[in-house]
Structures are given as structure tokens and as C-alpha cells.
Image (cartoon, rainbow, N blue to C red):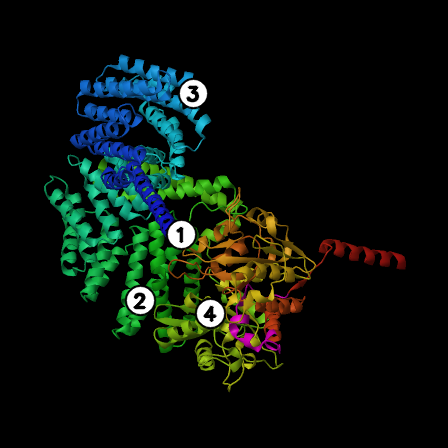
């Protein structure tokens, strides 16, 4: 019994201690949360957390932390300006600390100083001094006359004198504090820096800037030495020095100091938000003064709030809002423009209203856009002689109402705006475009066509002209689809589309803004789909080869834009063989001119700026023309990549197809139809069309998912239900003219140019004929009969056809996902049901590399990071045994070379970085393609990847369409290597690998296409060349020498 009672007592004590420990942890969490809220200038939210923590500390009699919480509550009320509450809590802390801990305790001294601070804030300076002297008296009794805590009391007394304007006495006490700290702690202690910091602030209060700078520099030096370069107190000193330097006009020095301070804050330094916001806004304003809106936007985005911005000038706020809008961030731009508008009520805010309405429309907030447009219209109606502003206000309201679907009212304001004044041509174009759209929604096609024709006038803005031509072509196509003057409208749509096509390629050589490029990107697909559709319909009415060729031309142009526009929209890419100075000058000219073009649209509202903006535009245009000429001369390959988009000629394409016994299937996937172009090199193009909506689109997705997702059922039982029927049905739809063997019985090679949702479609696993209930290994796959190569455009096919082919044998190299040595994957690292497990993933990459590099070189372990890849020696073929991760922006897709960064690189080699590197091989093999783990679905990136590698010298790559399925990929690569011999093409080697894989007798459950159909070759069907260890020119010279010797000997 006694033992049981003792056990219960021990248990109760343990539970109590555990509960107390838990309460302390909870209280500390509340207090830490409150500290962060105070740092983020959220005192009201901090108070409740502090009060909750104080209650828990009081219950546990943890008086030190309890009174610390009470003092922090006082500080929060002071920050809120609630002085009576602050005094009440300071007195509570003072008297309760005396009651609980006795008169002479440090918590009472702290409370006395907080009470003094509250009195100073209320203007009761004598009471403040009395409280501070009480705190000093308590500490003298506690610690004697030489203790650092006394220095803190001296600082409080000095602050009270400073608040009274008695600066001499304040300095005397600050100097006493400094002297005490130096004598007790040493001259380089962080507490001594506090004294210098306070002396610097006191000097600044007296407008003694040089003296203030001296003290703050000394504080900064001590803090750097004692606390480290990344400490929050270092950031505070930098911020204070930055503000002082900015006040003296030393902008460069201030920018340097502010930049370092913000860097500390970004890395997690606990610094108050207001000075950081002020620093960010200052840095943004400096960037704007230098004509660097992108950098200004970056600094403004770093700002933890707009507190500092609210004190900024109208011009700075307006410019930042304008910069955000230009950079495609209208929501952020609107916030700055609202601030600017609130500051400039007495002056003309017309351009600010204009940009605000535009920002809200582009941010998808038509209600706010309409509200601000109405404010604009009311303001403009009250102005004398502001007809242009009145016209613009009507137009802005019309645009906004159109976004709200109020078509009739929108048309009214647009018509009114166009009739009020002689508006600039670009205004009339934009308004006519919107008016045409309004008429079209009202089903007034004649009025819509008339408005679009006004917008398409040749003397206006080329960009608006392109938009108008696209709208005109779409309107004529829609009329043709309604059987209204079908032939006439089809011909008009085709003619206008051709004009728009010529114009868009001229536009791309101009320095367009990112927003304009995005609009072209969004519209070009509709333009070219309508043009291809017009060609198809005209060909049905009057079959002519020219219609098929023109449709193929339009499909090519659209695909070229798919890969060209991301390059034009992404600045900061380095390109192989291009002088860095030219790239910088090109980027600066494009940025300046796109900004000036935007400003020119607002010039009618800012007449005083007309001359300046036009002079700047002329100057930058001349510089841009010089840069373009220099690029043509010094970097012709780069100039062709970005600015010269040659349409493919049918004759050289047919020659390549005929010479390689290749059949071309080119696809164009639009919103409504799938267009199929077929060419064999000896006859003209054939054009077919399939409706994409409905069953075809659904079946394409369903069939693809059956290939790319690991099969879960027992595959030994035969094909999955519906697989054979679906594979055969899609084959007949995608191959309306089916490839067949020639007279010699040889099957042609297939060159497939997929597009849209077909980019990663596994054509190899389509079935070419009806089958019975066969095993997966016995099905008549297309990839079992034909060698298949891929490319994204016919022009890219031609380009890679003329590049150097891959060589065999070797040297073969492999680049391995960093970590672990090469080894064969263990048998338990993979299963047909679950694929590679986490432990087997790295070993799988290593096993692939070990197989690939038998007799070659593998880069693995510590030598396989990004730095190593950038300096790889050249080779015939290189296996990238690393995951390739797709991204929404195709240029941001990357090869993951290592899971962690190193001191030089992030080890994520992006597609845009490949342009600056010489390709390490003539054939690259990518073993694993993966979609991002989070975010929306993304499109394939391989066209951009292929283009980047072709630019850097690699004309052929093999890509695995999905995440590699473990050892089956090793088997496929082994069979590929066995077939990789001079004289055959890479697609033929892959065909042989597929055939050999499917003929295996072991593991029939792995005959499903998921395991073997992933590999696709991108390039051209060129024969593999023999590897010559001796340079060819030396061999030719040796042969010539032998001939000469033989001739001489016969003499």
C-alpha cells in the first residue's frame, strides 16, 4: 500500500513538472511571437500575445519573464500612442515587481525607465526624469557604481534631456554611459557600440551631420568586429548611416549602405520594418533615376511595406507604379499609383488616372478600373482646355465597361472619346480595336470590320496594326464559318493573315515591351490556326498545291514563334560567341526604347515632356540600330537565332527526306482542329484535318496516361482493357496515310514534328493493325516497325541535318546525379508494381552511367556538380544520368545535377544557361524527364532544350519522355549501345533496341510500352559516322604522300 501511494505521489509530481514545463514553453512561444510582431510594426497584435504569456508566467511564478512581458506591453502601447495605457502598465510592472521581488530589483528599475519613457512621450519631462533617477538609484544599490546596467540608466536619463531639448546634459550622460561601458567591458564590446549609436543620433538631432556620421561609423565598426557582418545591429547601423548619407546628398554612399542593410534583413535579420522599407524605396528611386525600372521594381518588391512610400514624392511613386505596370505587375503598380494620385490632387493627374485604369484592367479588376475611369471623367469634365484628357477619360471608361460585359455602354463612351478631339493615331487604333470588339459582341459584323480596318491603318503603331489585322482575319474567318460570302471571306482572311505574318516578324526585331510580346504570344496561335483553316477550306473548294504549302508555312511560323518569344521575353541570358558588351547594350537599348514607346502614348497628357521624350527616343533608336548591325557582323549565329526566322523552303526539305528515305508527318494542334501535313520527298504536301474537340482530344490524353503512369495490374495476363482498340484507333486518326514498305521491302524512317499536346505523345506505342488477345510483347507497335525521329519545326530539322553527326565508337561519357559512387542498382530497389524506390533512385542513375561508360568516363560523386559540367571535355556521346525538371516558363526548366548548391553554383542547370556553354557532345541522352512536384501542369520543354543545344553545337539528343522506369531503361540502353554502329541512323539504333527489348523472353510483364516507349530521338535521320582517332586531314595528307611515293618509284 505504501509503495502504491509513493508511486502515485511520484507520478503526480512528474505530471505537475511536465505541465509546468509545457506552460513555460507555451508562454515563450507567445512572447517570441509578440517580439516578431513588434519588429514588424504590429504592436496591437503583439499585446494580446504578451498578455497571454504574462498570465502563464505569473501562474508559474516566473517573475523575471513575467515583468519582461509587462515592460514589452508598455512598449507596444507607446508605439500605438496610447500613453495612458502605457503608463498604467509601466506602473503595474513597477509596483508588482517591488511587491514580489523587493524594492531593489532590476525588473523594478526597468519598469521605472519604461514609465519615464511614457512620461517623456506625454511631454511630462520632469516626471520622466524622476522615474529615470529612480531606476538609476535602484541599480546603484543593486550593483554599485561600476556595472553595465548603470550605463543603461544613464542612456535613459540622456534621452529624457534630449526630449527636453537640453542637448548638452544629454551628451554628458551619453558620454558617462560610454565611458563606463568602455572601462568595464572594453572599447570593442557591442554595448560600447550602443553608446556611439546614441551619441550619433543625438548629433543628428542637432543637425551636426559630420559628428553624427563619425559616431555611427564607430558604432558600425565595433558591431562588425564583435557581432559579425550579418547581425541585425549591424543592419541598424548601416540603415542609420544610409539615412544620414542620403540627407547630405551622397546617394552612391547611401545606396551602398542601404543595399548591405537590406541584404541582412532578407537573410532573416530581425530588423524593424520602417527603416528597411525606407531603404528599399530609396534604392528603387535611385534605380529609376538611372533609368533601370527592372531593378527599381526588384527593390520595391523587397520593401516590407509602403510606409516609407507614403512619404515619397509624386514623381517617385508615379514612376514606380509605371515601372511595375511595364514589368507585367499591374496589381503592384496600382498600389503605387494610388499613393501618387493621393499626393497630387492640385496638379494634373490625367496620366496617373490613365495608368490606374489600365493597371486595374490588366490585373483583372474591371470594377475598380471602371470606378477610377469615372473619377477620371469627372475630373476631366471640370478642367478647361483639357479636351485630350476628356477624350482619354471617355476611352478608359469604355475599355473598362467592355471588360465588365456592358457592351452597349462601352460602345457609347468609345464613340464619344473618338469624337471629342483629334486624338493621337495610337489612341485611335486602340479605341477602334475595342470598339470593333464591342460591335462584334453586338453581332454588328459590318461595323466591327470597319472599326478593325481603322485600327489596321498603316501610318499608326505597328503593334496595334498587328492586333487589328489579327482581329480582322478572325472576323472574316468567323463570317466564312457562318456560310456568309464564304469564298470571299476565306480569301480575305488568308490575305490579311499573310500581311499580319509579315508584320509580326518585323515587330520582333523591334524593342517591344514584355507586355507586348506576351500579347503576341497569346494571339499568334489564333492567327495562324485561322490562316491554316482558311487554306484548308479553300483547298477543299479548289484543290491547289499552293494552299497546302501555304498552310504548312503558317504552321511552321507559329511553331517558330513558340520557341522564339520566350527568348525575347527573358533578359539576362548569356550567349556563346557573343561579346558581353554587345549583349548588355542590346538589352539596355530594348529596355529604354520599349519604355519610351509606352511614355509616348501618354505624351498628349504631358505636353511639357514631348520634346525630351522624342529626343531620347531618337538617340536610343540610333544606338539600337548600331548594336543590331554589330550583332549581324560579330555574332551572326546569335542574330539568326533571335531576329532572322527563315521560313522553310519545300525543295531542300524534300531533298533531305528523299536522301534519307524519310516520311514526314508534321502536326499542328489548334484550339479546334488538328492539322496533319505529310511529305515523302518525291511528291507535294498532303494536308488533313481532324476535329480536336471531343473524342480525339480525350483519347490522346487517355492513351498518353496509359504510357506515362506505372502500370499497377498484373501485366502477365495480357494487354490492358481497351489498349489495343485505342492504339489502333489513334493510329488511323494520326496517320491518315500510313507508312508502308517500298519495293525493296524496306520501311521508311519517320520524321515526326509534333505540336501542342502531341509534343510528348508516345507515337511508338500506337498499333498498326488489328490484333487478337496477344501479350504486350507481341503487339504490332509502330515503334517496332519504323525508325522514328522528332523535331519541333521543319527548319530545325534542316538545320540539324547539316550539323556534324554523332560518332561511333566512343568516347562515351556519363554525368551522374551527384552523390554516391557508381554501382549496379540492387534487386530490391525496383519493382514492376511500384517503380524505383527512394533508395534505388540514385543507384539507378549510377547503374545507367556504369552501363553507358563501359570503357569510357563517368563523372560522378564530388566531380559531377554544375562547375564540372561547364568544363567537360568534348565527346561523341554523353548520358545525363540526372533528372530534367520541367517548368511553366520553358527556359526555366533545369537539369538537377545535385540536390544541394555549392559555393559556386546552384547545381540546377537551366535551359537558358545552355546557350552560354559549348555542347560537351554531339549526342546527348537525357534519362529522366519529370514534371514539377507542385503547381499547375506544364507543357513540354524539349523544343527549347533542343534549340539551346543546337545553338551550342549539339545536333542530336535522346530524351526519355517521363521518369525512367528503373532497370528496363538499362536494358533499352544496352540494346541501343549494341546497335549504335557507323552507317545506321540513331533512330534506326533505337528501333533495333525496341525490337530486341520486346523479343526478350524474361520478364514479359515489362513489355508494356511504359517500360520501353519513353525514349525519343530529336534531331535529323543522319547516319552515325565512324570515329577517327586521327584527324581526317592527317589521313588525307598521308594518303596523298603514299600516292606521290608510288608515282615517284615508278619513274
Mark nearer the viewer, 1 or 4:
1
Side (left or right) of 281 relative to 447? right
Q: Which residue is mark 2?
A: 492
Q: Which residue is mark 3?
A: 185
State the image coordinates of residue 149 (x, y, percent, origin top left).
34, 22
Q: Say which label, 2 or 4, has the lower sequence index.
A: 2
Mark 4, residues whose alpha carbon is within 10 Å: few (<14), some, or many (≥20)? few
Mark 2, residues whose alpha carbon is within 10 Å: few (<14), some, or many (≥20)? some
Mark nearer the viewer, 3 or 4:
3
Label 3 sits on a secondary structure element that is helix
From mark 1 to mark 4, how far is it between C-alphas? 63 Å
Residue 67's disc number = none
State the image coordinates of residue 531 (x, y, percent, origin top left).
36, 67
State the image coordinates of residue 700 (x, y, percent, origin top left).
42, 73
Q: Give the magenta-colored segment's residue range.
A: 997-1023
Residue 569 sits inside the magenta stretch = no
Q: Say which label, 3 or 2, has the lower sequence index.
A: 3
* Quadrant assignment, res 340: top left
**CB-based contact (under 8 Å), mark 2 and mark 4:** no
Q: Which residue is mark 4?
A: 709
* Quadrant assignment, res 523: bottom left
Q: Which residue is mark 1?
A: 3
From mark 3 to mark 2, how far is it between C-alphas? 88 Å
Reply above or below: 419 against 605. below
Reply above or below: 369 against 828. above
Mark nearer the viewer, 2 or 1:
1
* Quadrant assignment, res 805: bottom right
What residue lies at 61% left-to-right and 76% top-to-bottom? 1002
Amino acid at each position: 500500500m505504501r509503495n502504491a501511494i509513493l508511486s502515485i505521489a511520484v507520478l503526480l509530481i512528474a505530471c505537475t513538472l511536465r505541465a509546468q514545463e509545457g506552460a513555460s514553453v507555451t508562454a515563450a512561444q507567445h512572447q517570441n511571437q509578440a517580439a516578431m510582431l513588434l519588429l514588424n510594426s504590429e504592436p496591437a497584435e503583439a499585446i494580446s500575445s504578451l498578455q497571454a504569456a504574462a498570465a502563464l508566467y505569473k501562474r508559474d511564478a516566473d517573475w523575471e519573464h513575467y515583468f519582461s512581458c509587462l515592460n514589452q506591453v508598455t512598449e507596444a502601447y507607446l508605439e500605438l500612442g496610447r500613453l495612458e495605457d502605457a503608463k498604467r502598465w509601466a506602473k503595474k510592472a513597477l509596483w508588482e515587481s517591488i511587491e514580489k521581488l523587493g524594492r531593489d530589483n532590476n525588473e523594478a528599475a526597468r519598469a521605472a525607465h519604461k514609465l519615464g519613457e511614457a512620461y517623456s512621450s506625454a511631454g511630462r519631462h520632469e516626471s520622466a526624469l524622476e522615474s529615470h533617477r529612480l531606476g538609476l538609484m535602484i541599480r546603484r544599490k543593486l550593483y554599485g557604481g561600476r556595472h553595465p546596467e548603470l550605463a543603461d540608466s544613464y542612456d535613459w536619463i540622456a534621452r529624457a534631456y534630449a526630449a527636453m531639448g537640453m542637448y548638452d546634459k544629454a551628451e554628458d550622460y551619453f558620454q558617462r554611459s560610454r565611458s563606463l561601458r568602455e572601462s568595464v567591458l572594453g572599447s570593442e564590446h557591442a554595448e560600447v557600440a550602443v553608446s556611439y549609436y546614441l551619441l550619433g543620433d543625438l548629433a543628428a538631432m542637432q543637425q551636426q551631420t559630420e559628428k553624427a556620421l563619425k559616431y555611427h561609423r564607430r558604432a558600425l565598426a565595433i558591431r562588425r568586429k564583435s557581432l559579425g557582418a550579418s547581425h541585425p545591429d549591424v543592419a541598424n547601423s548601416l540603415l542609420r548611416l544610409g539615412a544620414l548619407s542620403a540627407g547630405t546628398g551622397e546617394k552612391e554612399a547611401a545606396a551602398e549602405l542601404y543595399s548591405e542593410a537590406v541584404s541582412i534583413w532578407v537573410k532573416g535579420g530581425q530588423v524593424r520594418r520602417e527603416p528597411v522599407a525606407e531603404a528599399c524605396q530609396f534604392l528603387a528611386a535611385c534605380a529609376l533615376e538611372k533609368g533601370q525600372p527592372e531593378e527599381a521594381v526588384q527593390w520595391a518588391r523587397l520593401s516590407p511595406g509602403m510606409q516609407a512610400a507614403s512619404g515619397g514624392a509624386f514623381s517617385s511613386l508615379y514612376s514606380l507604379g509605371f515601372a511595375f505596370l511595364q514589368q507585367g505587375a499591374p496589381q503592384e503598380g496600382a498600389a503605387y499609383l494610388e499613393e501618387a494620385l493621393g499626393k497630387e490632387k492640385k496638379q494634373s493627374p490625367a496620366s496617373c488616372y490613365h495608368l490606374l485604369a489600365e493597371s486595374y484592367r490588366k490585373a483583372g479588376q474591371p470594377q475598380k478600373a471602371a470606378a477610377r475611369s469615372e473619377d477620371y471623367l469627372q475630373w476631366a469634365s471640370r478642367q478647361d482646355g483639357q479636351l485630350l484628357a476628356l477624350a482619354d477619360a471617355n476611352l478608359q471608361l469604355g475599355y473598362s465597361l467592355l471588360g465588365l460585359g456592358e457592351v452597349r455602354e462601352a460602345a457609347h463612351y468609345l464613340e464619344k472619346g473618338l469624337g471629342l478631339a483629334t486624338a493621337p493615331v495610337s489612341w485611335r487604333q486602340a479605341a477602334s480595336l475595342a470598339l470593333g470588339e464591342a460591335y462584334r459582341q453586338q453581332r454588328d459584323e459590318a461595323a466591327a470590320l470597319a472599326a478593325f480596318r481603322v485600327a489596321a491603318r498603316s501610318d499608326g503603331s505597328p503593334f496595334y496594326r498587328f492586333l487589328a489585322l489579327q482581329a480582322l482575319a478572325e472576323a472574316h474567318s468567323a463570317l466564312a464559318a457562318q456560310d456568309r460570302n464564304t469564298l470571299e471571306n476565306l480569301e480575305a482572311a488568308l490575305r490579311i493573315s499573310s500581311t499580319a505574318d509579315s508584320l509580326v516578324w518585323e515587330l520582333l526585331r523591334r524593342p517591344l515591351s514584355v507586355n507586348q510580346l506576351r500579347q503576341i504570344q497569346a494571339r499568334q496561335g489564333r492567327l495562324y490556326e485561322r490562316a491554316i483553316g482558311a487554306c484548308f477550306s479553300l483547298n477543299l473548294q479548289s484543290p491547289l498545291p499552293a494552299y497546302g504549302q501555304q498552310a504548312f508555312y503558317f504552321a511552321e511560323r507559329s511553331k517558330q514563334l513558340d520557341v522564339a518569344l520566350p527568348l525575347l521575353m527573358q533578359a539576362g541570358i548569356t550567349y556563346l560567341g557573343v561579346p558581353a558588351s554587345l549583349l548588355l547594350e542590346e538589352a539596355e537599348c530594348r529596355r529604354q526604347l520599349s519604355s519610351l514607346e509606352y511614355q509616348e502614348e501618354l505624351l498628349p497628357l504631358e505636353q511639357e515632356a514631348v520634346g525630351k521624350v522624342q529626343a531620347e527616343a531618337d538617340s536610343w533608336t540610333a544606338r539600337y540600330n548600331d548594336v543590331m548591325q554589330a550583332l549581324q557582323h560579330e555574332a551572326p549565329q546569335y542574330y539568326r537565332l533571335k531576329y532572322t526566322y527563315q521560313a522553310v523552303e519545300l525543295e531542300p526539305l524534300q531533298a533531305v527526306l528523299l536522301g534519307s528515305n524519310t516520311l514526314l508527318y508534321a502536326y499542328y494542334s489548334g484550339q479546334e482542329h488538328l492539322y496533319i501535313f505529310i511529305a515523302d520527298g518525291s511528291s507535294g504536301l498532303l494536308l488533313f484535318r481532324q476535329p480536336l474537340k471531343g473524342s480525339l482530344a480525350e483519347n490522346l490524353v487517355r492513351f498518353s496516361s496509359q504510357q506515362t503512369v506505372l502500370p499497377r495490374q498484373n501485366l502477365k495476363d495480357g494487354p490492358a482493357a481497351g489498349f489495343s482498340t485505342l492504339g489502333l484507333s489513334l493510329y488511323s486518326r494520326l496517320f491518315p496515310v500510313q507508312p508502308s514498305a517500298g519495293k525493296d521491302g524496306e520501311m521508311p524512317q519517320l520524321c515526326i514534328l509534333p505540336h501542342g499536346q502531341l509534343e510528348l505523345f508516345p507515337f511508338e506505342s500506337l498499333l498498326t493493325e488489328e490484333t487478337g488477345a496477344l501479350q504486350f510483347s507481341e503487339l504490332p507497335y509502330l515503334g517496332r516497325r519504323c525508325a522514328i525521329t522528332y523535331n519541333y519545326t521543319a527548319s530545325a530539322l534542316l538545320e540539324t541535318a547539316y550539323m556534324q553527326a554523332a560518332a561511333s565508337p566512343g568516347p562515351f561519357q556519363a554525368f551522374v546525379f551527384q552523390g554516391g559512387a557508381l554501382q549496379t542498382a540492387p534487386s530490391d530497389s525496383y519493382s514492376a508494381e511500384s517503380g524505383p524506390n527512394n533508395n534505388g533512385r540514385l543507384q539507378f542513375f549510377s547503374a545507367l552511367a556504369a552501363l553507358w561508360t563501359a570503357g569510357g568516363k563517368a563523372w560522378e560523386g564530388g566531380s559531377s556538380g554544375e562547375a564540372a559540367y561547364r568544363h567537360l571535355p568534348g565527346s561523341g556521346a554523353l548520358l545525363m544520368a540526372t533528372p530534367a525538371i520541367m517548368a511553366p516558363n520553358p527556359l526555366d526548366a533545369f537539369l538537377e545535377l545535385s540536390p544541394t548548391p555549392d559555393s559556386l553554383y546552384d547545381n540546377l542547370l537551366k535551359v537558358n544557361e545552355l546557350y552560354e556553354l559549348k555542347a560537351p557532345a554531339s549526342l546527348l541522352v537525357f534519362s529522366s524527364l519529370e514534371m514539377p512536384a507542385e503547381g499547375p501542369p506544364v507543357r513540354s520543354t524539349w523544343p527549347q532544350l533542343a534549340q539551346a543545344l543546337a545553338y551550342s553545337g549539339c545536333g542530336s539528343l535522346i530524351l526519355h519522355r517521363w521518369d525512367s522506369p528503373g532497370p528496363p531503361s538499362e536494358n533499352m540502353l544496352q540494346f541501343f549501345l549494341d546497335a549504335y554502329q557507323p552507317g545506321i541512323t540513331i533512330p534506326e539504333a533505337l528501333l533495333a533496341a525496341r525490337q530486341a527489348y520486346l523479343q526478350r523472353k524474361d520478364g514479359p510483364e515489362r513489355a508494356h510500352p511504359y517500360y520501353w516507349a519513353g525514349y525519343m530521338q530529336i534531331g535529323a535521320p543522319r547516319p552515325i559516322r565512324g570515329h577517327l582517332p586521327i584527324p581526317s586531314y592527317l589521313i588525307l595528307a598521308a594518303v596523298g604522300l603514299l600516292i606521290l611515293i608510288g608515282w615517284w618509284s615508278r619513274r
